Image (tube, rainbow, N blue to C red):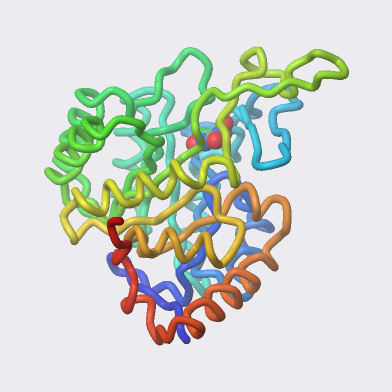
Amino acid sequence: IDFKTTMANAEFPSIFLNASGVNCMTVTEMDEMINAACTGGVVTKSATPQQREGNPQPRYYQLEHGSINSMGLPNEGFPYYLDYVTKEHAKPTILSVAGLKMSDNIELLHKIQASDYTGLTELNLSCPNVIGKPQVAYDFEETDALLAEIFSFYTKPLGVKLPPYFDLVHFDQMATILNKYPLTHINTVNSVGNGLWIDIDTEKVVIKPKQGFGGLGGTMILPTALANVRAFRQRLNPSIKIIGTGGVTSGADVFMHLLCGADMVSVGTALLHEGVGIFQRLTDELTTIMAEKGYTSIEDFRGKVQDF
Ligand SMILES: O=C(O)c1[nH]c(=O)[nH]c(=O)c1Cl
């Protein structure tokens, strides 16, 4: 079975990507993603205008059923990633960008618009760990204003990375805004913001930044991720594709994201834990499930989750 798919002008040889932030900080990591078996390409770490050290360590911690992080947007800086994605690669790239303020986002997109890069870009509206900054995507007016400004000049393929929402009315409000713009895709979900974990031996929180508050990922957020993928698939124009992210550790999890309507699936916590070999495993497990059910193509079941 071939798992190739197309988004905007890019042909991905597989539906699998890394979640931005994992295995995508450096050229070495991004090349490893592209050269790995069963990957569709690579999503860069969200780039800020200048290089950033990020938050003090420990800033990532693996839990029994997932992860917690408050990285603080460490990255090599926008020029580094623009240079990488503008080069030729065997598979497509998605350039992730994250401004620390509105003007940063506008400035970064003007630079991409003016550059030779013709691939996909993903605007991260959902970083939960920039201290003192609320997530843009939880401010509907700001999101609407930002997208209106961007699409007044930006003509290249653009998607947005969204945080999870937890209220059906919020799905309605956000989808109404997103449907106004010619987005290539949304990527949902980013980590579940500001969780907390404690080591009871030391009675201390497990990460240093933000008094231990950090974004949650991994198995424990899969139900939230599935709900967000389904809710947006039901509400968004079919022209807006969906990268399903959150909680994927097995072929069954991939199958559920696809049933909810995802076009591609990205993996973060489990990729960090297992390495790029996970993509062959997910491919094999999904293939087995499809064979057992008599499906020969993802289109046989994508978006066809049934109500009870
Ligand atoms: O702290 C981070 O770098 C970070 N961590 C996340 O879990 N999601 C994001 O979008 C970002 Cl930008």
Residue 252 located left or right of residue 262: right
Residue 145 located left or right of residue 80: left
Residue 157 occupies quadrant? bottom left
In this orientation, does residue 129 appear? Answer: yes
Q: Position of residue 279 (x, y in %)?
A: 61, 68
- Tally of numbered discs: 0
Quarter of the image with the C terminus is bottom left
Task: Judge by depth and name the residue closer to the eye, 201 or 268.
Answer: 201
Q: Position of residue 273 (x, y in %)?
A: 72, 51
Q: Is residue 112 above or below residue 150?
A: below
Q: Is residue 305 above or below residue 196?
A: below
Residue 224 occupies quadrant? top left
Q: Residue at x 48, y 34 (%)?
A: 48
Ligand 1 shows up in the quarter that is: top right
In this orientation, does residue 114 appear? Answer: no
Residue 289 located left or right of residue 108: right
Q: Residue at x 30, y 54 (%)?
A: 185
Task: Judge by depth and name the residue closer to the eye, 129 or 80.
Answer: 129
Task: Judge by depth and name the residue closer to the eye, 279 or 226.
Answer: 226
Q: Is residue 227 above or below residue 72?
A: below
Q: Position of residue 256 (x, y in %)?
A: 44, 60
Q: Residue at x 45, y 81 (%)?
A: 293
Residue sticking out furthest to the right = 201
Q: Position of residue 177 (x, y in %)?
A: 16, 37
Residue sticking out furthest to the front = 308
Residue 156 occupies quadrant? bottom left
Q: Residue at x 64, y 32 (%)?
A: 68
